[in-house]
Image (cartoon, rainbow, N blue to C red):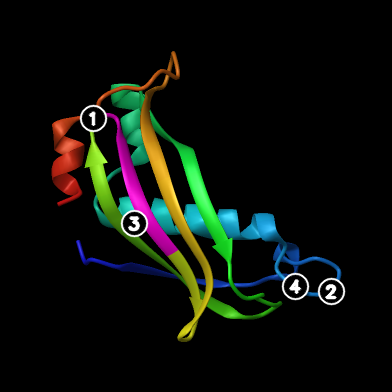
Amino acid sequence: MPLDFHWPVRVYWEDTDAGGIVYHASYLRFLERGRSEWLRACRVDQAALRQRERLQFAVVDMQIEWKRAARFDDQLVVVTALTGSGGASFQFAQRIVRGVELVVAATVRAAALDADTLKPRRLPQHVTQLFQ
């Protein structure tokens, strides 16, 4: 897995407010797509994990800084990097860029949960091996 995983995102009208500026909550969706595509690139099949192993992931902590405004039709890139993992959680550093300009910086911690009880559950070794 490369150190930084890049996922392109174009800003659509549905992502903006009445002034054509990206609505703050839209960035959370962009970041989620970056993490989901990172997992896919690591060959982690989230649907299969949920069905076969009763395991799912949830964001449990996020720190976010909005640095610049993005606008309708901007082409952005969500950059995702795994910064740590242990027990039942893993951490990411993410940023959204427009060219070389930083738009958003975020740190995210996600937890592995039992799909039935929603209680934390240790990451299976076969999953953590895929992260390396």
With 61 as the anchor, is 92 left or right in this view? Answer: left
Question: Disc 1 designates what residue?
Answer: 87
Disc 4 or disc 3, which is closer to the eye? 4
With 8 as the anchor, is 13 left or right in this view? Answer: right
Which segment is the magenta one?
Answer: 88-94
Question: Disc 3 designates what residue?
Answer: 38
> Dot 3: few (<14), some (14–19), or many (≥20) neighbours within 10 Å?
many
The CA span between labels 2 and 4 is 6 Å
In primary-sequence order, the first of circles 1 and 2 is: 2
Residue 82, position as x, y percentages in the image: 28, 54
> Dot 1: few (<14), some (14–19), or many (≥20) neighbours within 10 Å?
some
Dots 2, 4 in contact, CB < 8 A: yes
**Residue type marked 2:** Gly
Question: Disc 4 designates what residue?
Answer: 21
Quarter in which the N terminus is drawn: bottom left
Q: Is residue 75 above or below residue 9?
A: below
